[in-house]
Image: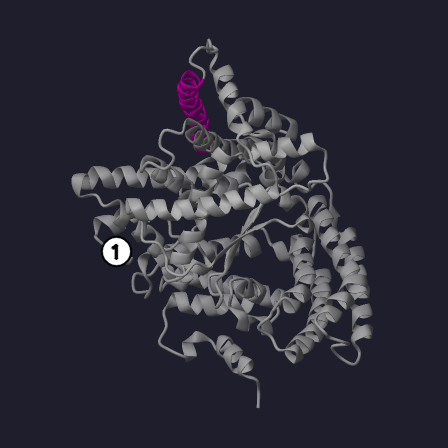
Amino acid sequence: MKPAFYLYSFLFLIPISFLFSQNLAEEYIAEWKAFHPSQAVQKGIHGSILNTEERSQKSVGQWVAFNEDVLKKLSKPTTEINTVDARLLRVQAQSELDQYRARSLHTTSLNLYARLIKNTLPQVLKADYLLLSEKKDLLCQRLLAIQQWAVQAEQNLQTVSKEDLDGGFKALEDTMDYLKLGLRAALQKQGIGAPCADFDVQVQRTITKIKGLKVVADQKRKPFATPPNGVLGPQEYARRLALYTDSDLTPDQLAAMALAEIDSVKNLMASVSRSYLRETYPAHVLPKNSSELIQKALVDMEKDAPLNAADYLAFWEDLAAEAVDFIQEKNLATLPKNKTLHIKTAPESAGPSARIGWVASAPPFAPNPMTTLYLPSIPDTLPRQEQVDFWASFNKPFNRIIVIHELYPGHYMQLKVARETPHALRLLFPYQPYIEGWATFTEKVLLDAGWESGHHLTLLAHLRKRLENANRAYTSIQVHCHGWNEKKVMQFSTETSLLAPQFAKSLWGRIMGSPLQLTSYYWGGAQFKSLLKSEKERLGPSFDLKFFMDTIMKAGPIPIDAFHTIFQNGQPNP
């Protein structure tokens, strides 16, 4: 008899059309899982781990044709699908066509294959829902899959940019090191010997195939295919921005908005700084220059900092509890039941990520939805001044704002509530500006409700973060559309936008790696603020903030402008 897991997994492999009468969204999800099984596993759809990607020309051609057909169906008024979901599905189909038709990643990106190759074995080993025997079978199958991907890459790749080639080479070299040194140790740690009889032979064949792929890919190098350093250029950036925001927003419009925000917020910071300094140093003569006023207050803000990682962790645990109590006391939103959150110090093994921290959110379809907040850390073996400078960037007023953004009612709470939405499409293909936009917006909501009322430095920290958000959007556009280099970004970010050094240092990498995502903090936040203003004006005294917040979270991450119609039509469960 097959293990129960196989029966569970088999259900995920059956096209949904065979199980029930379905609409276009369900049909698309079934096909997406078949084409992107690794991504499906990352979303918590565990049954997809039995499958691997197929990237032959035939498979890619079928996927392109399917997405083109979906767009045609969406244009027909008779197609059965929720209006909001139809919009998300249209953006998703356009995004897939952008990757596999317009940009033709399967013929131009070594990275497309290198990422699959690098991640496939660790994904199986980390799957704690698999039996040991199942892991063994899948590990041997994945070695064959890597060999197949290497062959498909050799056959498909036509030209590869230097930047993509460099990244792909790095991933392939990491994989070969893992196969030579790391895989055996990982197997032993889980009590797995040789997963199959010819395991060593297959490992060596896999390494040989990867080496061959590197040679072939290098022959297809295209050194001058893209602007230097991976810059998109104004036309490509504009095209991707329109797709990312699902709007006619242009880079120049967004840059103008962001720059106006920078100027406006700096004026607010000067006002708050003046109030703080007058209250704190009544006998002192205040600087007349706005920049000097702000800097003087920021120095005090950065002095109120954690002493070390242990102090920081204890502070955050108390802070999270305070945020929950405040939301409940002010009746701002319905708090989710059952806490599924851990707060930990980021391990040094995380490398550069340990310096900024991150949230390991529970995948939307994971059966055990635990989320872990990894706090930034720095070794206490480093020089004391370096530690002091580090913790100054993560000062306590700053964290009193970040707890809202990351946890309550920001990312953690929003994702936890959204898991209950009946619309699977929204969890698989969220409207990206919603995610950071919501977390950014909630900071202002809680401050307006009285969070840290009277604490000027907390308000100053919020304004500084608003400045950082606008700076992210503005500098992303300047780099990709107007030729700014790293030095110019660093100078503008620290001198004009007053970023803390710890954040300014990491900005360039994010501008190059996720230029559109960087716009969502400011753009998404601005959209939510506009929505709140509109609803308050429309409803007047009958406006209910808790209903407003709950409706947005329960709907899931959908286009923000869609909420105008949802609220006007009185749809609490859109």
Can residue 503 be seen in the rendering of this structure?
A: no
Can residue 268 be seen in the rendering of this structure?
A: yes
**Residue 235, image x, y percentages:** 53, 38
**Residue 76, image x, y percentages:** 33, 61
Q: Secondary structure at mark 1?
A: loop
Q: Main secondary structure of the magenta part?
A: helix
What residue sits 45% from the left and 23% below the top?
266
In the foreground, 275 or 209: 275
Instruction: Say whether residue 131 is left or right of residue 315.
Output: right
Residue holding disc 1: 572
Instruction: Say whether residue 356 is left or right of residue 179.
Output: left
Q: Is residue 548 above or below residue 522?
A: below
In the foreground, 100 or 328: 328
Looking at the image, the residue that sits furthest to the left is 541
In the foreground, 181 or 231: 181
551 within the magenta span: no
* CA neighbours of label 1 inside 10 A, class few (<14), some (14 to 19), many (20+): some
What residue sits 79% from the left and 70% below the top?
203
Magenta residues, as a range? 254-280
Residue 111: which quarter of the image?
A: bottom right
255 within the magenta span: yes
What residue sits 51% from the left and 76% below the top?
13
**Residue 183, image x, y percentages:** 75, 66
**Residue 497, image x, y percentages:** 52, 26
Which quarter of the rendering shows the C terminus? bottom left
Q: Amino acid at mark 1?
A: Pro
Which quarter of the rendering shows the N terminus? bottom right
What residue sits 44% from the left and 63% below the top?
69
Q: How is the image coloured?
A: one colour
